[in-house]
Structures are given as structure tokens and as C-alpha cells.
Image (tube, rainbow, N blue to C red):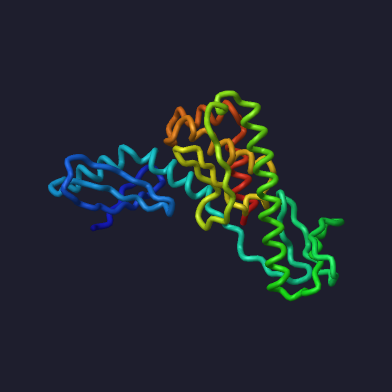
Amino acid sequence: MSTHLVHFGTKTIHFQIHRAERKTLNIQVHPDGLVHVLAPLNADEGAIAQKVKQKAGWIIRQQDHFASFLPLTPPRKYVNGETHLYLGRQYQLRKVESENQQVKLYRGCIEVHSLDTSDSAIEQILQEWYKVKAREIFADLLAEYLSKHCRFQKYSVNLHVKKMPTRWGSCSPAGRITLNSELVKAPKACIEYVILHELCHLIIPSHNRKFYRLLSVLMPDWENWKARLERVMV
């Protein structure tokens, strides 16, 4: 395995060559942004680099796509006054000692009521609240889009919500749409963008021109919300 690079405009693409007993050359972009080239044993390095350069536009789009699905929100503290996001808005954490355990949004604060107000206990309660809210909101938005767009109605869609370290969503060929529970902290339109993005994969699995054309038909301003997602979740 060896590492190489090519230049494409102002961009530099680093890629690794993996040689194997094969006849064709295949370029893969992984979720971490790494570019792997699977090449025949006797393939010329110059020819491989030229092929990577020819596919540079596609490679960069793939890297940008994966980067946009990378959660960047730094770890939050669970002390009074720390800010926590919910649907794109910032709320100050307020711990309230109470026998009635609950989470409330009140006058710019996210109140966590609990007998145990230690940081670890508040974190556990708040994270569980986020998961519950995420499932409710994501399910409602998904149902709304499935009913609104008939092109998706022939697919059997199953929603799964979990915390994912490297992406905002995914869609399997079987119709399993998985959304990152952390998305509930982003503005509603950002969540809609991710849901629509994954729904489009039911029709077009690859990130090609047809895929982005379909996404643009369904959400003409999706690029603005993609950028907002990247900007707000930092």
C-alpha cells in the first residue's frame, strides 16, 4: 500500500493504492474522507494518478458529502448556565432539585428536574430526553414527506434513530433509514434536508447528477440548509 497525491484546481487529493489480483481499477471514497484505489498488480502509477484526476470532481463531492454528515458539536458540560441546543436554538441548562423527574423548556432555559442533580445524572436524563424527542420529531417529518411525495410511497421504509459518531444519516437498499439522534439539536429544516437526502437514496443509491437533481426538485434550497447544518453544529 502506498500514498500519492494529485492536484485539482486549488484542491489536493491524497489517495492510497492497494494492489491486488484484479483486472480493473476501482476508486473508493470512505466516510472518513480517505481515498482508496484498488488497482491491478501491474497497473502503472502514472495511469492510476491520471484516472484519479479524471474522477477528482466526483471524489471531492463525495468527501464534501461525508464531511457534511460529520457531527462536530463539542462535548457539553452539565452544569448550570451551560448552553445546549434543541431544534437550532440555544438553551441554558438549569438544574432543579425535584421529586418529579422531567425536562422542560422555559424562558430560554432547558430545565432538568431531578432529585439527583449531579452532572452525571443530569446528563443521563437530558440525553434520554433528546432521544425521545428525536424519535418523535423524525417520525413525524418522515411520515409527512412519505405522504407528500408519491414517488416514495412504493417503498417500505423503516426508521431507526441512534447516536452515530461520523454521519447524520444513512439509507440501506432495504429501506432502513437511520438518523443520528444528535440531529434533533439542529434547525428543523436541516433535519428535513437529511431526511430528504436519505429518501432520495431509495431511488438513486449513488451521489450522481441525477441524485442531486432529484434532491433539488424536492428541496430547491437544500444547499443552504446543508451549509447551515455544518455551521450550527460546531
Which residue is rendered at x = 57% and y = 26% of the image? 217
Split into 4 quadrants, where in the image is the N terminus? bottom left
Split into 4 quadrants, where in the image is the C terminus? bottom right
Which residue is rendered at x = 34% and y = 50% of the image? 35
- Apparent side of residue 98 relative to residue 5 in the rendered image (left or right): right
Residue 90 image-quadrant placement:
bottom right
In the displayed structure, 179 sits above or below 209; it is below
Outermost residue on the left side: it is 42
Residue 126 image-quadrant placement:
bottom right
In the displayed structure, 219 sits above or below 72; it is above
Outermost residue on the top side: it is 150
Which residue is rendered at x = 48% and y = 30% of the image? 203
Q: Position of residue 108 (x, y in %)?
A: 83, 57
- Apparent side of residue 186 relative to residue 117 in the rendered image (left or right): left
**What is the total number of numbered labels drawn onto the structure image?**
0
Q: Position of residue 4 (x, y in %)?
A: 27, 54
Please state which of residues 48 and 107 is positioned toward the viewer in this rendering: 107
Residue 2 image-quadrant placement:
bottom left
- Apparent side of residue 44 relative to residue 210 in the rendered image (left or right): left
Which residue is rendered at x = 65% and y = 42% of the image? 139
Q: Position of residue 231 (x, y in %)?
A: 62, 50
Q: Position of residue 57 (x, y in %)?
A: 39, 38
